Amino acid sequence: MARTIQEVLDLIIAAVPGAPQAGSVDVLKSGDPAWEVTGIVTTFTASMDVLRQAVELGANLVITHEPTYYDHYDSDWLAGDPVVQAKRAFIEEHKLAIFRFHDYWHMHEPDGIITGMVRVLGWEAYKQEDEWMVVVIPGMTVGKLAASLKEKLALPIARVMGEPEQPCERIGLIVGAMPGDFQIKAFERWHLDAIICGETAEWQTCEYVRDANALGFNKALLIAGHAKSEEEGMHYLVEWLQPKVPELSITYIAVGDPVSLL
Ligand SMILES: [Zn+2]
C-alpha cells in the first residue's frame, strides 16, 4: 500500500498528545507532502553523511531531531552561504523530504528521546514516575556512572566533574542543549547528585559545579555531548514508528559526536 509523506506525518502527529502546535519547528523542511514514501531514515541530525546514506538506501523521507540548516527555525539567515546552498542543492537534486521531529518527540508521553536513552542505558527500573528526567540508582558513583556511559553510549572518553568515588544516586538526564541556568536550577529542583547533559555552558554549569564541590556539596556533571545524549531516542523511533507503517522500510542512521579526539 502506497503512502504519501503527508500520510506518514499525519500518523506520527496523531500519536503525540497536544500536537500539532502552531509555531512548532516540527514541519516538513523540504520535499512535497504528496510524494509517495520510498523508505524512511531516522537520525539525530540530517547531516550530509546521513543524506547520502538515505539516497543509497532509496529512502526519500528523513526524520531528523535537529535542524538541517544550523538554526532552530531553519530560517534563511544563511541563505547565501555556500555550504547551505550546496546542501540544499543536494536535497533538491535527490528529492529528499526532511521532517523535523523535535518538539513532538519530546512532547510524546513518555518523552521519546528520554525513553530511548533510558532503554539503551538499561535504566528503566530506576526511572522516577513523577519526575521524568530523573533516575535513582542505588550505590551509583561518579566512576561507575562514567564507565556505564562510555560502554552503553560508546563514548570514547567521559568528560566528568566529580571524584570517581563520589556517590551519585539521584541523576538528572538533562539531555540536548538545555541552557546553563536550567542545568544549575535542576540540581536543587530535583535534589540531584549528578547531571548527565548533552552540551553544557562551561562558564555557568561547570563553574557552579566546581564551586559546589569546593564548598563541600556533592554534585557531579557528566558531559556526553549533544548528539550522544539524544540520538538513541531517534533509534527508538524506528521501533515506535514501524507498527504504524509495517510495509515501509525504516532505517536508523547514527551520527555520533561531530568532534574527533586526536
Ligand atoms: Zn532533543
Image: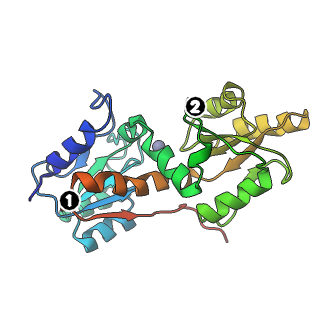
Q: Residue at x 75, y 52 (%)?
A: 160
- The amino acid on which the numbered mark 2 sits, given as a three-letter code, is Glu
For marks 1 and 2, give the CA distance.
43 Å
Q: Residue at x 39, y 64 (%)?
A: 253
> In the rendered image, which residue does mark 2 sit on?
131
Residue 19 at least partly seen: yes
From the top left corner, tell me how far across and down residue 200 is, in percent: 64, 43
Callout 1: few (<14), some (14-19), or many (20+) C-alpha neighbours within 10 Å?
A: few
| Viewer-side label of 1, 2 | 2
Circle 2 — which element? loop
Badge number at residue 149: none
Near-viewer residue (198 or 128): 128
The response on whether ligand 1 sits within 8 Å of label 1 is no
Q: Residue at x 65, y 34 (%)?
A: 183
Near-viewer residue (122 or 11): 122
- The amino acid on which the numbered mark 1 sits, given as a three-letter code, is Glu
Q: Vertical placement of 72 versus 161: above or below?
A: above
Image quarter in which the N terminus is found: bottom left
| Quarter of image, res 250 | bottom left
Identify the colour scheme used.
rainbow
From the top left corner, tell me how far across and down residue 215 is, in percent: 90, 32
Near-viewer residue (231 or 236): 236
| Quarter of image, res 167 | top right
Q: Are marks 1 and 2 in contact (CB under 8 Å)?
A: no
Q: Residue at x 26, y 46 (%)?
A: 29
Callout 2: few (<14), some (14-19), or many (20+) C-alpha neighbours within 10 Å?
A: few
From the top left corner, tell me how far across and down residue 66 is, in percent: 41, 48
> In the rendered image, which residue does mark 1 sit on?
92
The answer to whether residue 212 is left or right of residue 240 is right
